[in-house]
Amino acid sequence: MDKKRLASHVEEIENLRDIIKHNLNGLQIHLDKIKKILNEPDVEPELKTQSQPQPSPIPLEKLKDRYLTARETSELTGIRLTTLGNQRSNRRGIPYIKAGGSIRYRMKDILAYMDEHRIVTEESRSRGRGRHR
């Protein structure tokens, strides 16, 4: 490599070094500003105490038409994911929908399945509640 080309590369590297140094300085300024904001007391603390509007509850009828993933179904019912998978393989358990590679359980079916597996105790029978098995 000739001296002229080498000098050109060295100059280019020095320019890049200056650009990086400049960018690092800019980032440090932003970082210092963020640190300052995080350490400053709230200017308007009363804004924090104002409660955020709560979302209105979803009516049960709309929830019944909702579709849940296998994981959500597992969390809701307490049935392990592997058990749900085994039940699907054996065509048992909670009815499900398979669209492409996606498995979904309808909330209405989950509730029906849970109700079918409800165990009625003597105490609930004496109060006239529940289904008898």
Image: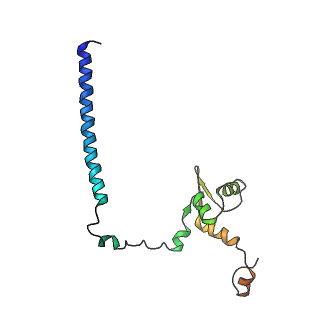
**Towards the viewer: 44 or 51:** 44
Q: Which residue of the protein is positioned furthest toward the top in this rendering?
A: 2
Kindly indicate the quadrant of the structure image that contains residue 48: bottom left
The residue under the point 50% across, 74% down is 59
Numbered disc total? 0
Quadrant into which the N terminus falls: top left
Kindly indicate the quadrant of the structure image that contains residue 107: bottom right
**Towards the viewer: 127 or 91:** 127
Q: Could you say where residue 71 lies in the image, as x and y percent from the top left?
A: 59, 58
The residue under the point 27% across, 26% down is 13
Kindly indicate the quadrant of the structure image that contains residue 95: bottom right
Apparent side of residue 34 relative to residue 80 in the rendered image (left or right): left
Is 51 drawn above or below residue 71 in the view shown?
Answer: below
Q: Could you say where residue 22 lies in the image, as x and y percent from the top left?
A: 24, 38
Q: Which residue of the protein is positioned furthest toward the bottom in this rendering?
A: 127
Q: Could you say where residue 11 lies in the image, as x and y percent from the top left?
A: 23, 24
The residue under the point 26% across, 40% down is 23
Is 102 drawn above or below residue 49 in the view shown?
Answer: above
Apparent side of residue 66 relative to residue 13 in the rendered image (left or right): right
Is 1 drawn above or below residue 124 in the view shown?
Answer: above
The residue under the point 63% across, 59% down is 96
Q: Could you say where residue 111 lies in the image, as x and y percent from the top left?
A: 62, 70
Q: How is the image coloured?
A: rainbow
Quadrant into which the C terminus falls: bottom right
Is 59 drawn above or below residue 128 in the view shown?
Answer: above
